[in-house]
Amino acid sequence: IAVAYTMAVTHPRAGNIGGGGFMMIYHKQSNQFYAVDFREKAPQQAYKDMFLDSEGNVDNQKARFSIYSAGVPGTVAGLESIYNTFGSLPRQRLFQDAIAYAKNGFLIDQDQHKVLEDKKELLRKDKQFRKLFYKKSNNDIIPRKKVVQKNLAKTLTVIQSSGVDGFYKGKVADQFVDFFQQENGLITHQDLTNYQPVWRTPIYGTYKGYDIISMPPPSSGGIALVQLLNILEQKKIDQLKHNSTDYIQSVVEAMKFVYADRAKYLGDQDVVDVPVAKLTDKTYAAEIANKISTQNIIDVSTINPELLDTSESLETTHFSIIDSEGNMVSCTYTLNFAFGNGMIAGKTGVILNNEMDDFVAKPGSPNGFGLLGNEKNEIAANKRMLSSMTPTLVMKNGQPVLITGSPGGSTIITSVAQVLLNVLAFDMRIGQASSAARFHHQWYPDVITIEEQHDGNIVEELKERGYNVKHKSLGITQSIEIDSGNLYGKSDPRNLSSSTKAY
Ligand code: GLY
């Protein structure tokens, strides 16, 4: 919780109190797993066609970079609920670093400087972003070296002393709602006071004797991860050479089915039916596995590979923790794109998310990650938008094996899956497993996104087999492997290089 509050200050493009996320928890003493959902919700006044223009087309600007793109934030409610259940640090200590960095400033590193440069045209439009994160230089503005967020420090101080009510009620809530009124936005006091995090039953799966514990809807992450691993277990993927052309083809074909099912079946399970048992069932996976072969490519047809070509920086962040008692946390939280919708909510100093774009604005129109969906994930009042975040725990015979998760939008699921495959099927240590080259396919658009560090001939061979292929860095996993009482931590080496590519 202290890490999450601190990253809301020092990693402001994704760490947040104005967004939402998910935390998987293993509580050692009770030997229980918990999946805490603090995903944003659509405001009460949101409605299905709110992002369509007069001709019925999706207005992406409105869906991604307007006051309407912000969902009701869930992070503070989630963190405070977890603190009230399991917290042990005194509140003064819990907020000490976050408040100090907000009040006294934190230093912008090379990676943050690059993202601030990339996002300059958007962020300069917001008076507060311009003032806090940039300074004048000749006729232009450049990122500051040190960022001080005094309003955010005040907001965190109120949360420190008043807990969840410090954000959703009282002065901070007044300031927050004032901003929405001033901008003609939809979020009201009632939206804030009604927000509740949900403690959900995790998604449980198995792969080669390992127990996989991950996030249920409104994230697609857990279901998609377990479905993919089930198919690949059937295909005996571990008998193929890791990252060979046959291996990539087999995994890619499985990914297509998983993302097609994501689009067809998944949404907020509090509002729509989600066939969790079917999608995570090994027999269903066997049916899919039987359709997959290295002899043919399943045609997803009529798909425009260019749709995933976005220059936007798509951000989220993850942390994995195990403490001295053996309790574990895997937490992914986000503002959606880097710096969310590019607005700071008035005097609160809180950066707003643009998570409403994770809904399906119109069937057939992809969101910012190129993802499709149907009415299961259409916009409705108080509904949670579908996510791909995949905070995950792995156990074997009741003992912890792995904690992992990643940012990366739609590529989170496949990045996490490949870390798991590398450790569980190919016996890599987490360092090698995290560094190994990755690939991704999400059914639509029909393209394999592949990292440049794959062996020389792979791309040519995949093209010869008939695939569209493009290069991009995939995921930034943050993992801990636990083996015979030893802990091996790995922060993805893509951390700097990938974010300098603004992804
Ligand atoms: N905003 C990205 C996700 O939740 O999947």
Image (cartoon, helix red, strand yellow):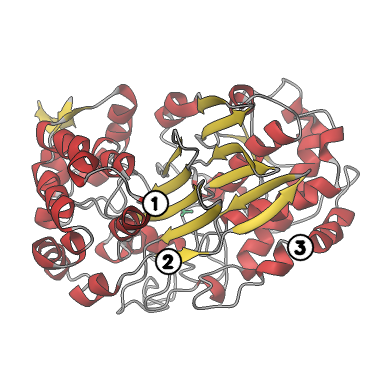
> Image quadrant for the C terminus?
top left
Label 3–label 1 contact, CB within 8 A: no
Q: Secondary structure at mark 1?
A: loop
Residue at (55, 76) in percent of width and height:
375
> Residue flagged by tag 2: what amino acid is it?
Val
Q: Whole-percent x and y of residue 134?
A: 15, 34
> Residue flagged by tag 3: what amino acid is it?
Asp
Most extreme residue toward the front is: 29
Q: Nearer the viewer, residue 77 or 12?
A: 77
Spatial separation of the CA atoms under disc 1 and disc 2 = 20 Å
Name the residue tied to disc 2.
198
Q: Secondary structure at mark 2?
A: strand
Mark closer to the chain start, 2 or 3: 2
Q: Is residue 221 visible?
A: yes
The disc placed on residue 336 is: 1
Q: Whole-percent x and y of residue 150?
A: 9, 42
Q: Whole-percent x and y of residue 421?
A: 71, 37
Spatial separation of the CA atoms under disc 2 and disc 3 = 25 Å
Name the side, left or right, on which 448 lies relative to 361.
right
> Residue flagged by tag 1: what amino acid is it?
Asn
Kindly tell me whether mark 1's CB lies below 8 Å from ligand 1. Answer: yes
Of circles 2 and 3, the one toward us is 2
Name the residue tied to disc 3.
281
Occupied quadrant, residue 318:
top left
Kindly tell me whether mark 2's CB lies below 8 Å from ligand 1. Answer: no
Name the side, left or right, on which 354 lies relative to 302.
left
